[in-house]
Amino acid sequence: MATWSALPALALASYPDRPVRLIVGFPAGGVGDITARLIGQQLSQRLGQPFVVENRPGAGGNIGTEAVVRAPADGYTLFLVNTANAVNASLYDNLSFNFVRDVVPVASIASAPNVMEVAPAFPAQSVSEFIAYAKANPGKVNMASGGIGTLAHMSGELFKMMTGVELVHVPYRGGGPALNDLVGGQVQVTFEALPASIALIRSGKIRALAVTTATRSPTLPDVPPIGDTVPHYEASGWFGLGTAKNTPASIVDQLNAEVKAILADESFKSRLADLGGVALSLSPAEFGKLIAEDTEKWAKVVRFSGAKAN
């Protein structure tokens, strides 16, 4: 027969029974921040507690990551993990944490391509023509990015590594200024994020040569993947949820199941598509494998490029 003394323990076992923080390592308004707010809103509705987005920008997202690593392992501090975390593991020399070891993968949310794009006046009409032009004009093609270590930068360095072309990296303080100079012809190519580029592509101010994902993007169905010309090239951006290590597996599994249910909803998929993303529904183990593989992959590209965080 149940006793009254068992009831408090049962109540404590119910997760969540208070608000959950969702830390985003970037300023408000970007694609990652919007994604976090969308998923947080859905989790709040499904689980009956607020999932409060807290922006902790700085150091390429590392300030937010460190806040999660140091938080109690109780599931009440989540983190929007993304491709930058995989790059930062080798881009920064003196991190106080090990991303793969210290952050537990909870649930993937979305993947999204970057776009290899040029100014309309640039002579190459395809990836193969671009490679031929760059090899015929070594050191004369400027590659813009939103900064050292960004996915746009790393996507370009991976392209250089796999094709042998010589491109001059020109880092900017954000993707917007890089795209502005691409439109103006001051630089010749960038590998910028699809959401930032799509309006310029549709207006004809820049021309998309290829997407960086292994398959075509539903947002740009007529644009081929770079991998069609450069076999095995792939540079997806991705977002997901992580939390501190030693968080109970029951909480991780519960959150993963809830996120998977959200991702199965067609209206949510449509909202991700508006951001240039595609739903990415993985188990914690599968997401952890993706993170580990990308961390290793980008470490090779960082070494090739010689890039270091400023």
Image (cartoon, grey):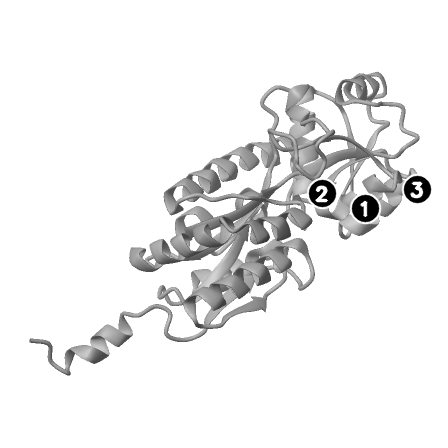
Disc 1 target residue: 199
Q: How many discs mark residues in the rendered view?
A: 3
Residue at mark 1 to residue at mark 2: CA–CA distance: 9 Å
Disc 2 target residue: 194
Q: Is residue 296 visible?
A: yes
Residue at mark 2 to residue at mark 3: CA–CA distance: 19 Å
Helix, strand or loop at label 1? It is helix
The percent coordinates of residue 149 (x first, y second) are 65, 44
Nearest to the eye among marks 2 and 3: give it.
2
- Residue at image point 89% right, 23% down: 123
- Residue at image point 61% right, 34% down: 235
Helix, strand or loop at label 2? It is helix
- Seen from the viewer's position, the closer of residues 69 and 1 is 1
Q: Is residue 209 left or right of residue 246?
A: right
Q: Which quadrant holds residue 301?
A: top right
Neighbour tally class for label 2: few under 14, some 14-19, many 20 plus, Cα within 10 Å:
many
Label 1 near label 3: C-beta < 8 Å? no
Residue 251 against residue 48 in the figure, above or below: above
Helix, strand or loop at label 3? It is helix
The percent coordinates of residue 153 (x first, y second) are 70, 39
